[in-house]
Amino acid sequence: MHEPEQDPFGESEEGGELMAPMLVAKLQEYGISHQDCQKLTDAGMHTVEAVAFTPKKTLLGIKGISEAKADKILAEACKLVPMGFTTATEIHMRRSELVHITTGSVGLDTILGGGIETGAITELFGEFRTGKSQICHTLAVTCQLPVSMGGGEGKCLYIDTEGTFRPTRMLAVAERYGLNGEEVLDNVAYARAYNADHQLQLLIQASAMMAESRFALLIVDSCTSLYRTDFSGRGELSARQTHLAKFLRTLMRLADEFGVAVVVTNQVVAQVDGGQFASADSKKPIGGNIMAHASTTRLSLRKGRGTARVCKIVDSPCLPEAEGIFAINANGIGDPEETDK
């Protein structure tokens, strides 16, 4: 099997465009004390990028960091991390080198422009039994493949909120791609989230793990289920949306910082206020506008004929609205038989 550790952060030797995140200890070379670097790490900032992206008021909230120290830390971090203007040409070149992780289905990869995009959040929403968790299980394996095979040459971090994680599914996918099943499972870091606060806390642990080892994919299945139970009624709606926005912002920062692909699943709710004039599709994803704006690409899943499922691109900054058909097979996500199309 291809070992993810051999290419620590997936840089191409000739391009060198994709730089590895700098550990926060790097700031010691620029006059920041070891103690202050440790305080930043304890606060969940494990890279210089994380520090540079953090608002000053957040740094001031760390015990022992004065305003003068916060100013110096931010000044040094911003010198190391490019945060100014650049040309569209340079952005275009970077995007042309983006890695896409295969879903296992040719039909799905085609409408997605090659697969799940790294450095971005992809949201999957749909009813039960539409293939959300099955896509996640397949991606957890395919992200470990070499780039030449549609992989990301990295490990997977899997946060499960519904108790639907099944390693046996990953073993079946690993066998399909000729990978060593034991090594594939060793490269998947799993955590079960039990409440919304715990779910957010796990991202801080995820940041520490990503600073130490190469991860290509972060999965949250499901992103919103705990929010439906931890916050109830309109009285807690504002608190729920604020907490969800913070969680999604942290996910986006991890995608920016480490270049990982972030895949989140979302549940749907029935619209009952439309009466006879309601549209044919009366199900909408929960989370409201905050969820909609945070996701880079939104994919709607629904059941098709037989084992077939239909994926529709609902929102994307660069992909046109399109539909693709895939199937849930014994060896993971694939293409349907002709009879199911």
Image (spheres, rainbow, N blue to C red):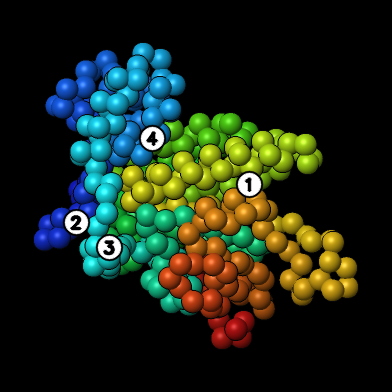
**Residue contact at pointers 2 and 4, CB within 8 angstroms:** no
Gap in angstroms between the C-alphas marked 3 and 2: 11 Å
Farthest bottom residue in view: 338
- Callout 3 amino acid: Ile
Mark 4 lies on residue: 54
Q: State the image coordinates of residue 124 (x, y, percent, origin top left).
A: 57, 60
Which residue is pictured at 40% across the width and 73% down the height? 113
Which residue is pictured at 41% across the width and 67% down the height? 115
Compared to residue 299, the image places residue 166 above or below, namely above
Q: Callout 2: helix, strand or loop? A: loop
Mark 3 lies on residue: 91
Gap in angstroms between the C-alphas marked 4 and 3: 23 Å
Whichever of callouts 2 and 1 sits on the residue coming sooner in the sequence is: 2
Farthest right residue in view: 276
Mark 2 lies on residue: 17
Q: State the image coordinates of residue 127 (x, y, percent, origin top left).
A: 69, 61
**Residue contact at pointers 1 and 4, CB within 8 angstroms:** no
- Callout 1 amino acid: Thr
Dot 3 crowding, Cα within 10 Å, few <14, some 14–19, many 20+: few
| The quadrant where residue 61 appears | top left
Which residue is pictured at 32% across the width and 24% down the height? 70
Foreground: disc 3 or disc 2: 3
Farthest left residue in view: 14
Whichever of callouts 3 and 2 sits on the residue coming sooner in the sequence is: 2
**Residue contact at pointers 3 and 2, CB within 8 angstroms:** no
Gap in angstroms between the C-alphas marked 2 and 4: 24 Å
Mark 1 lies on residue: 224
Gap in angstroms between the C-alphas marked 1 and 3: 32 Å
Q: Quadrant of the N terminus?
A: bottom left
Foreground: disc 1 or disc 3: 3
Whichever of callouts 1 and 3 sits on the residue coming sooner in the sequence is: 3
